[in-house]
Structures are given as structure tokens and as C-alpha cells.
Image (tube, helix red, strand yellow):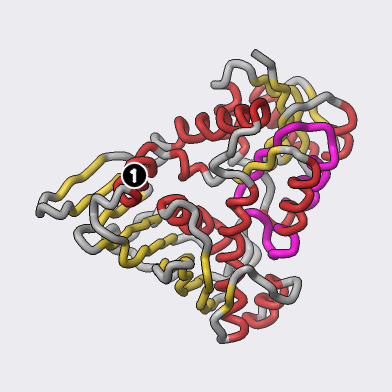
Amino acid sequence: MKNYRVGLIGCGGRQNAHVSTFRQIKNCEIVAATDWNQNVSEEFAEKHGIPTTYVSVEEMLQSVDLDIVTIVTRPKWMFGPVMEALNSSVKGILMEKPFGVNIEDSRSMLEATEKSGKTLVVNHQYRFFELTERMRQILLLGQLGEVEYFRAISAIKLHGQGTHMIDFVRYLYDDRPFAWALGNFTGKESFDAKQIGPDFDVGVVAFDDGIPLYVESGQGSMQAPYPGNGLNLYADAVCTKGRIWFGLSHGLRIWWPDGNYEEVPGAWPAISNPAQIRLVENMIDTIENGTEHRCHASKAYATQEALCGLLESGLTHQRVPFPLDIAPDLMERVRSVVGA
């Protein structure tokens, strides 16, 4: 079994979860870390017993032989480190969601990935929840009839947890392509917070078979059925013979065609750790055997198109078709409109 040497880029709070994951995988060893704030990286390395820190991504990639890097920065700073890693000798890159900010950056990262032959994975770990697997199988086997519509709700912004919920539904529906988006947005209060973008987004993204996904994200998103829940993250599918609902902190609810109702318990963070491990194990299998990764950059790109299509529709007041062909610097154009 090959051993994998892992380097960390960005040493904020979310990186703690990645450290825990890699240390639960026997053939992975974390050997280096870097952060734009050297004090942060040194404190993080001391906390986790990481042997070496570097002052920059470039220095770390040039100084130590790495197989995998995990990149955890704010979305607006993600592009540079990802491209540096793609141009280095590493074999695999795990980046936090979303897959960039503007679609041209996402496209550049995907093209560089395809050219390099490296494995770039976006951390849409909801695809690996056991609850997700059951929900997906129920829908794909038609146990509730045909899907009539999907809904995805996130109390956190579109480029925050909103990307998880849209990607989650795409996986449930077997990664069918989207055909168009229609959306709107408002709010500048938290535009440059941890997740960049307007405070509230609403809209619909239609799959190529016409089935709609209704989206709400950010401040003002619907709080039912659990008002005040900080992890207000839901997705459901309404079908011709029943309905299935997922809540990140509440598990599954299933309304079966025979009239029975079922609840399947499961809540974050307990469901997250095993999913994260499966994601990394899948990544190692992809590196070694060329198998398809459930969270590969090519899949994340389709989700990113949906995010950007909803925002572009809000700017133009038009339905936006896919594949996406829009002017560059989308987020700066949105910023200008909301006055952020």
C-alpha cells in the first residue's frame, strides 16, 4: 500500500476537519502546512503536531515532496493555490467548496485539471452521506413514482452552503445536466463575509428533462419546519406517488405510496466524519486506478454553473441557458448592482 504525503494550504477552522480525516486513513501522513498568516500556520502546526510550516504555497510545493494537498481558504482566494497545485508535482488536490467564484475561474481550473491529468476534488461531501445514498436509490428506482420537482433551502448564502444543497440534488438526480436558470438576489450586508455574494438568493434551475429545482439561500430563506435552526439546510423531492425530505440536522422523512410515513435519524456532525473519510478514500482510488470520483471537478463545474446562472439571471432579468456563456467578473457586476 502506497503512503501519501499530505500538505495543508490554509489553516483556518475548517482545516481541522481535514486533519482529522487524513489521520483516520492509515496510509496518509500530514507533513507540511502553510497559511498567508505565518503565525496562524505555526500555531496550527503546533496544535496538530505537523512537522514543518512554510511562508507561502509556492515555497511549500517547491520544498517538500507531496502527493496530496488540501486547500481551505475563502472562496475569493481559492483560485491561485489551486492553480499552483495543478502546476506542481502533487497527484491529488482536495479543495473546499465552492468551485471558485466567477465561472471563468472555474473553467480555468477544470481545463488545467484535464490537461494535467491530476485529480481535483471539490469537497461536496454530502454526496457521501449514507442518508444521501438511500434517498438517491429510492428516487432512481422510482419507489415514489416520477419526480415532479425538487427543492433546496440553505440559511447560508449561495456560494456557502447553497452550493452543497444544489450539488446534493444534482447527485440525487444522477447528475443530469441543467438546461436553464432563473433567479434574483438582494442584500449587501454580508457581501464580503466568509462566503462572498449577496445576502439572499431565490430562483429555479431546470434539469434538461424539464424537472425544476427551486432554490432559496441566505438570510430570509424559509425556516420551516424548524424555525431558528442554524443549520437550516434542507432538500426534498416531491414525486407522483410520495415525497422524500432530507434535513442536515434531522435525517430523512419519507411519505410512501402505501400511506406509511417513515423517519430515518441522522444529523450533522455525526454523519459528516464517515462521509469525509469515504471522499478521501475515493480520491486515493481515483489517483491509483483512474476510477471516477463522485466529487470530481467536472461535476462541481455543473453546480458552479447553476450558482452563476442564478446570479446572472438576477442581473439580466432573463432566463439564462446552459452551458453558461456570460461576461466575466460576475461577482463584481453583482457587487456593483447591490452597492456593496
In this picture, which residue range is highlighted in magenta? Answer: 78-106
Asked whether 265 or 317 is in front, the reply is: 317
Asked whether 172 or 10 is in front, the reply is: 172
Q: Is residue 35 magenta?
A: no
Q: Which residue is mark 1?
A: 137
Name the spot of residue 64 as percent of width and height, x first: 84, 25
> Residue 16, can we see it?
no
Residue 164 located left or right of residue 60: left
Question: Residue at coordinates 64% horizontally, 27% vertically from top-left?
Answer: 289
Q: Is residue 6 above or below residue 242?
A: above
Residue 85, by quadrant, is top right
> Residue 263, can we see it?
yes
Residue found at the very far left of the displayed protein: 259
Name the spot of residue 303 as percent of width and height, x first: 56, 58
Residue 169 located left or right of residue 14: left
Q: Amino acid at mark 1?
A: Gln
